[in-house]
Amino acid sequence: MKTWICVVLFLAVSITHWGCSNSADPSERTAASKEASSRDDAKTAKGKPGKDERQDRTARVRPAVPVKVSEINEGTITSSLVFDSVLETESSVEIFAETSGLILEVHVEEGDRVVAGQILARMENVEERVDSEEAEARYEHQKANFQRTKDLYERKLINQQEYDNAKFDLEQMRLRFERAKIQLENTIVRSTVSGVVTERAAQAGRRVATNRVLFSIMNLDELFANVNIPGQHMLSIEQGLPAIIDSDLIEGVRYDAFVKLVSPIVDPESGTFKAKVAVSKLNGMPIYPGMFVNVRVIVDTSENAVLIPKEAIVHEGDLKYIYKVQNGKAKKTLLHEGYSTVGFVQATSGIVKGDQVIVMGHSALKDGANVKVVEEAVAQEQGATNESSAAEG
């Protein structure tokens, strides 16, 4: 019995001792783990950089963006009013048949340039030629008779009435001869103006009636465009102002022009007044009536203006910016705009002659970004990449 009790007591003491040992181990292990973590952190601080530090260092060494730049220069820029219009001509005429008959010859085609008085076509004229020759013969005969009558009158051999009758008969013969010459001349179709044949209705072998249209001719040396200008500009528009006319149909060709006439009346319905802008010189390039054109009337000119290429402008809402290159970085600058032309804008402040502005590769730039000036092809490629990245973002 005693032996059994001793065994039980021994087991109880053993179990109690084992439980105490387990309850102490977790805290010891936690403390050891903390100590090991501290040693690892110390090693990290002394050796390999942490994640946040690596990100900061990557941001600091971000590569430069390749861009193309343009150096700013000064020049002349104009303020102008731009209008859409249609070219017209001062002289556009139709050539009619002055007599009826058969057309024998046609000497010009559409597109041919002619001068005033040039023969365009010939008509059958046998009868008219005979009448002209007969009238001429009668006139010459009557002149001889009148000369004899005049001699008799001067010698006082005939009275005043006989002399006046002879003079009247001579004048009648002269008028008949002149009329016959006109009828003969009417069989020859001539141009009444200088210009270009725009339409040919005459055909050889075709019989036409009097007053039938045979040709249409336009004078292309006197082209103009009518424009309707808002009334608030009436005091700034006057005769002689320079202008420029161009057409989208003929790219790259511009024609010098000037304000030829200004209407003194403002239309009460539209609030505009009319002005006629004439082409100064055609400079040998093709331009024709009926073409849609852009008319730019120059109202003011600014000398020594700071000119910004339009491809350098970045639009952000209603504001316009440009990026200048300074010390290898892009500096974002607000554009204060003055006069504007097709290719340039006047900068009134913030930009001076000699500044370098970015004209390619600035689509995804930020103020202060590192930039590298490169050739156009590289900048263009990088610009396309930046646009693609911005679109994906």
Image (cartoon, rainbow, N blue to C red):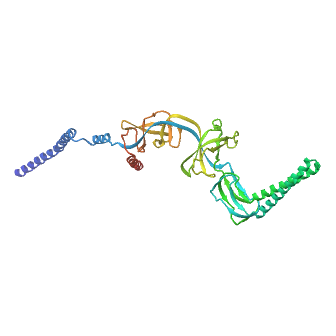
**Residue at 13% across / 47% down in the picture?**
18
Q: Report x, y in % for residue 126.
A: 76, 64
Quadrant position of residue 372: top left
Q: Report x, y in % for residue 79.
A: 56, 38
Answer left or right for 57 relative to 99.
left
Q: Decide which of 15, 263 is in the foreground and name it.
A: 263
Q: Report x, y in % for residue 205.
A: 70, 66
The answer to whether residue 117 is visible is yes
Quadrant position of residue 323: top left
Q: Report x, y in % for residue 185.
A: 75, 57
The answer to whether residue 98 is visible is no
Q: Decide which of 95, 117 is in the foreground and name it.
A: 117
Answer left or right for 256 relative to 216.
left
**Residue at 6% across / 52% down in the picture?**
4
**Residue at 53% across / 41% down in the picture?**
341
Count of number-bearing discs? 0
> Residue extending furthest left?
3
> Residue extending furthest front?
155
Q: Decide which of 171, 141 is in the foreground and name it.
A: 141
Answer left or right for 346 relative to 51.
right
Answer left or right for 46 relative to 139.
left
Q: Decide which of 218, 121 is in the foreground and name it.
A: 121
**Residue at 79% across / 60% down in the picture?**
133
